Image (tube, grey):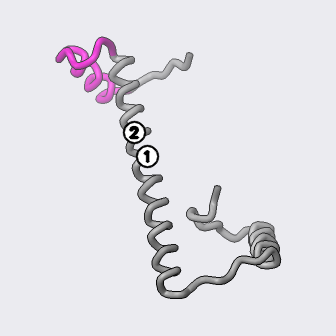
Amino acid sequence: MARIDINDPYEDYLKSLVDAGLFRSVTAAAENAIYRQMVEDEKLRLSSVSAAIAKGEADIQAGSTVRYTSSLMTEISEKGKQAALAGKTIKNEVKP
């Protein structure tokens, strides 16, 4: 189990939540804060995925697509490898 030190004013805030009866311990209050951040991160991730899907759907509607072929995938993979070797930044929507 991890142990962390929490500095003021964060510890005081967590203690005030416990004193108010909202949590049984400072640990429970900290766990809740971490959980809520995880939920928010997941919402942002899903929002990003939804935006990428919407962009793809708009491209399909506009006819801005390319027919998939195995040679296309090979070409895309090769370009990605070359970009990585050249130290180019990979867009977030392309990262796994």
Give left or right: position of 51 versus 93.
Answer: left
Q: As displayed, is residue 77 above or below residue 39?
A: below
Give left or right: position of 26 versus 58.
Answer: left
- In percent of the image, x 73 and y 68: which residue is there? 87
Q: Secondary structure at mark 2?
A: helix
| Disc 1 and disc 2 in contact, CB within 8 angstroms | yes
Say which of 5 and 48 sits in front. Answer: 48
In the rendering, at what x and y percent does residue 54 appear?
A: 44, 70
Q: Which image quarter holds the N terminus?
A: top right
Residue 86 seen anywhere in this rendered image of the structure: no
Magenta stretch: give its range: 7-25
In the rendering, at what x and y percent does residue 55 appear?
A: 47, 74
- In percent of the image, x 54 and y 87: which residue is there? 63
Amino acid residing under circle 1:
Asp
Circle 1: is it few (<14), some (14-19), or many (20+) Cα within 10 Å?
A: few
- Farthest residue in the left direction? 20
Say which of 52 and 33 sits in front. Answer: 52
Picture quadrant where residue 84 is located: bottom right
* Rendered image: mark on residue 41: 1
Circle 2: is it few (<14), some (14-19), or many (20+) Cα within 10 Å?
A: few
Residue 73 seen anywhere in this rendered image of the structure: yes
Q: As displayed, is residue 1 above or below residue 50?
A: above
* Rendered image: mark on residue 37: 2
Q: Is residue 59 magenta?
A: no
Q: As displayed, is residue 15 above or below residue 94?
A: above
Q: Secondary structure at mark 1?
A: helix
Amino acid residing under circle 2:
Gln
- In percent of the image, x 45 and y 22: which residue is there? 5
